[in-house]
């Protein structure tokens, strides 16, 4: 199917790809954290994701890096350090998630969740 901008239709098959990326537990949180804080090392990410296991974090980092959402940079330091950040695609994805989060925060069932939101769970939506 032609998905050019001239078309008024888009193939719903794209949802499979979207769900594969953001439907993974921890993916949206990880993307949001890297968008908020910039490049971080594994232990820094681990400390910001309450409840995640190290093996799960390793797996999601590997998957998102493989899909081009995250960058994985090995520094030249001795010992070498690995730093994760958002790629250009990852930044675009994060920016695309903001309207969804805004919509969600306006729904009644999420109002109670917002009341208990910790300051460290808030992300900036400025300069997107």
Image (cartoon, rainbow, N blue to C red):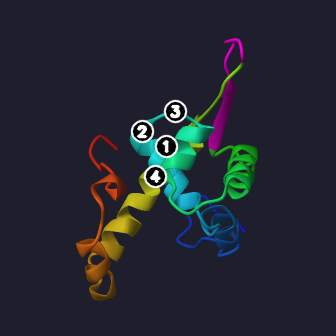
Query: Which of the 4 image quarters holds residue 127?
Result: top left
Q: Of the numbered discs in the image, which one, if any, rests on residue 37?
A: 2
How far from the left and from the top, in percent, is residue 93? 52, 52
Residue 53 visible in this rendered orientation of the protein: yes
- The answer to whether residue 5 is visible is no
Cα separation between marks 1 and 4: 6 Å
Crowding at dot 1, Cα within 10 Å, few <14 / some 14-19 / many 20+, comes out as some
Range shown magenta:
70-79
Q: In which quarter of the image is the N terminus?
A: bottom right
Q: Name the residue under label 4.
A: 32
Q: Which residue is drawn at 67% across and 24% down?
A: 81
**Picture layout, residue 117 above or below residue 89:** below
Q: Name the residue under label 3.
A: 39
Q: Mark 1 points at which residue?
A: 34
Tell me whether circle 1 and circle 3 mark residues in contact (CB < 8 Å): yes
Camera-nearest residue between 83 and 90:
83
Mark 2 touching mark 1, by CB under 8 A?
yes
Image-quadrant location for residue 23: bottom right
Q: Is mark 1 on a helix, strand or loop?
A: helix
């Amino acid at each position: 199917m032609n998905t050019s901008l001239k078309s008024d239709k888009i193939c719903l098959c794209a949802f499979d790809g979207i769900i594969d990326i953001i439907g993974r537990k921890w993916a949206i949180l990880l993307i949001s954290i890297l968008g908020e804080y910039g490049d971080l090392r594994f232990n820094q990410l681990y400390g910001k994701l309450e409840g995640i296991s190290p093996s799960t974090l390793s797996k999601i980092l590997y998957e998102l890096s493989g899909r081009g959402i995250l960058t994985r940079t090995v520094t030249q330091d001795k010992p070498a350090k690995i730093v994760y950040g958002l790629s250009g695609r990852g930044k675009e994805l994060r920016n695309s998630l903001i309207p969804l989060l805004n919509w969600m925060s306006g729904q009644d069932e999420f109002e109670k969740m917002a009341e208990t939101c910790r300051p460290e769970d808030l992300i900036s939506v400025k300069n997107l």
